[in-house]
Image: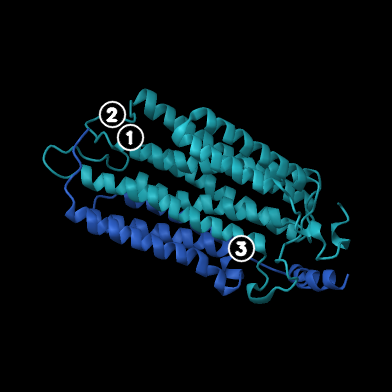
Amino acid sequence: MAAETAMAAPVADAVEEPVKRPYVYVFVVLAVVTLVEVYISMQDFASIDRVSILIVLATFKASLVAAYYMHLRYEPRWVMLIPFAALALVFILVAALTASTGTLPPIPQP
Amino acid sequence: MAEGRTRRYREPDVHQGSPWPFVIAIGAAVAYVGLIVSIPLMILGLVVFVSGAVGWLRDDLHTTPRAFFGTSGETGVLGKVSARKLATWLFLATEVMFFSAIIGAAWTIRFRTTSGPGALPWAYSGEILNVPGTALATFVLICSSLTMVEALSAIERGDQKHLRDFLLATMLLGITFLAFQANEFYHLYFVEHLTFTSSPYGINPNYGPAFYIQTATHGAHVTAGVLALAYTNIKAWKGGFTKENHETVELVGLYWHFVDVVWIFLFTLVYLI
């Protein structure tokens, strides 16, 4: 029972705190940014600017979901190493693909 | 099993000691090998896989597992992050790589088939895809993330009614998203004739396969999430979660939010750019 009490105590403490987490605010921001994204996609300005803005907005939205809904903000810091390690590998993948796209010949049409 | 709270932490059943994960792993391995060498072998693997999953869920349905912090009884360097949550995050990291590979392949095809003489262009945003409709579906998925996190918040307060309500809402919103997607696929394939080998309106013929593989892979993940939510709903209706023991809700939520994150990027990369 001693071990049980020791394990249950921190969880119970965490639950008893009046935790106010901004889930609804995050939801509103996500919804509004989605509308902004659709609006921007319909605008007629330089393609590279539009693409950059849209990717920044998507990254912002994804960060909000990860931080608040997936509770990364409330976990021990080291947990963030896991998704960031995956993102580092993604960065290498994107860099390699970008580099090869410029050097390899076009794929013939089927 | 309902007396879970009174069990000693280091009793073996805290770890379950269930054989079903092993069965699931064997089934998955056989199915993957079958995918390459023989369809009947693949079906056999899938049957073993599903049997293992059902067996494991049946075990779990009758327990109220607390957060599993490892085998030593000490939280140590892992802090208050349980072994199950750590495993879920590691699984999600592999999913990040999986989706990156698919999206990366699609963009490589896009870049390398739309340049050069005689190359047909990629569809521009809104040319063939229904952007406003999909924006609505995106909104539905965002709503489902909110209801999911509210379900977790409810059981953290011990509020069974709101747990059940929000879990049910999450599942229904997930099904709504899938209905949107099924309708879109039907329209694109049978009405617009965007297939795996041909495209309408002089669009590059690689557009179809690139579109379907990215969105259908995500749809398959949403389907898996809906199945996980169906199980979580059943367990919640049976009173299987308590204020102290509800880690399953949190872990299913982690997966569900991840599926939302993937869609946030896919919506931008496939529909808007």
Label at residue B86: 3
> Answer yes or no: do the residues labelled 2 and 1 have beta carbons within 8 Å?
yes
Output the chain of dot 2: B
Disc 1: which residue: B208
Residue at the location (35% across, 56% down)?
Answer: A54
Looking at the picture, which amino acid does disc 1 mark? Gly
Quadrant showing the C terminus of chain A: top left
Looking at the picture, which amino acid does disc 3 mark? Leu
**Is residue B176 or residue A6 the one in the foreground?**
A6
Q: How is the image coloured?
A: by chain
If you read the primary sequence from the N terminus, does the residue marked by circle 1 or circle 3 appear first? 3
Q: Residue A50 in the image: x percent, y percent?
A: 29, 55
**Residue B233 position (above or below residue A67):** above
CA distance for labels 1 and 3: 37 Å
Q: Residue furthest top?
A: B190
Q: Residues within 10 Å of mark 3 (few under 14, many from 20)?
A: some
**Is residue B211 or residue A53 the one in the foreground?**
B211
Label at residue B198: 2
CA distance for labels 2 and 1: 7 Å
- Location of residue A9 by image quarter: bottom right
Output the chain of dot 1: B
